[in-house]
Image (cartoon, rainbow, N blue to C red):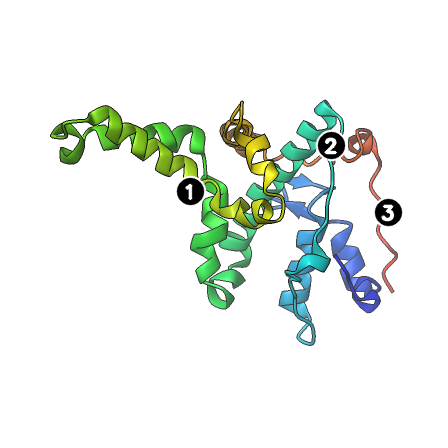
Amino acid sequence: MVIWTEIVQDNNFRIIFINECFFFDLFGLLNPDNDNFIIYWVLRYLQNYEIKIQYNNNAIIKTIFGQYLKFLMQYECWVCTTFRSNSYSLITDCMVWRRWPWIIWTIYIPSLFNLAFFWDPGMFYVFTQTKLYLESRSPILFLLCFGGWIYLIKLVKLMPYFWRYFMDFFLFFFPIPAYPLFIYYYSLLKLWAGIIFWNHSWTGRNLDASRAKPFPSPAKQ
């Protein structure tokens, strides 16, 4: 994220930024979610600035998973951020309803309730109750086709990546379907993160961050 210096040097910005709380100010001070705060600040209070997303090959960032436990802790931190940030955008701030109503149904709400571990078996059950399935001559074939369709739609988001690294498609799915299994694990992680959304320690990136003391507030002029 690239930020103009004059934005972060504003005294009002600094006071609110380092004293941010969440959930009706019941929890905080907030350690992660700093990038979300900056976006909210720019969109709501700075009329001369806008947010720009760079979607090209020059903006691609590559990283590695890192250590096993540390990566899972970082992922948990990200998912907790989703619940805090999206809830704030939809309920408290509400600006997204006016400025970008289309992304409410494509990003904000799905990111809160996309629990494939529960929805996929539910879709299979509902499909087995349909007239098409009950009256078919090859119910197993129908189930396999339906399962294949569910499997393929999970690739939509990753198609640009597989287009650039075609061999990774086979590494992701054969001989072990690692990516679909991770999706189901992520569903359980998201459910857990929704329960412990109040946990705002900066785990993963720095295992000692949760024990760090908050910065003191700048003196008011």
Amino acid bearing label 1: Ile
Count residues near mark 1 (Cα–Cα under 10 Å), then give few for <14, some for 14-19, many for 20+.
Answer: few
> What amino acid is at disc 2?
Thr
**Residue 11: % across, % down:** 82, 63
Q: Amino acid at mark 3?
A: Pro
In x, y percent, where is residue 53? 64, 62
Residue 205, compared with residue 22, is above or below; it is: above
Which residue does the numbered mark 1 point to in the structure image?
Answer: 153
1 or 3: mark nearer the eye:
1
Rounded to the nearest angstrom, the CA distance separating label 2 from label 3 is: 21 Å
Counting residues from the start of the chain, the first of labels 2 and 1 encountered is: 1
Q: Nearer the viewer, mark 2 or mark 1?
A: 1
Query: Does 200 sit above or below residue 40?
Result: above
Considering depth in this image, is 23 or 109 the residue closer to the camera?
Answer: 109
Q: Which residue of the protein is positioned furthest toward the front in this rendering? A: 167
Q: Residue at x 35, y 27 (%)?
A: 121
Classify residue 38 by image quadrant. Answer: bottom right
The vertical placement of 30 against 56, above or below, is above
Which quadrant of the figure contains the N terminus?
A: bottom right
Question: In the drawing, does residue 159 fall left or right of residue 202?
Answer: left
Q: Against 151, is 62 above or below?
A: below
Residue 140 visible = yes
The numbered mark at residue 206 is none
Comes first in the chain, label 1 or label 3: 1
Task: Determine which residue is flagged by label 3.
Answer: 216
Is the C-beta separation of discs 1 and 3 under 8 Å? Answer: no
Element assignment for label 3: loop
Q: CA distance from mark 1 to mark 3?
A: 48 Å
Q: Which mark is residue 203?
A: 2
- Classify 10 Å Cα crowding around label 3: few (below 14), some (14-19), many (20 and above): few
Residue sitting nearer the eye, 58 or 101: 58
Which secondary structure, mark 2? loop
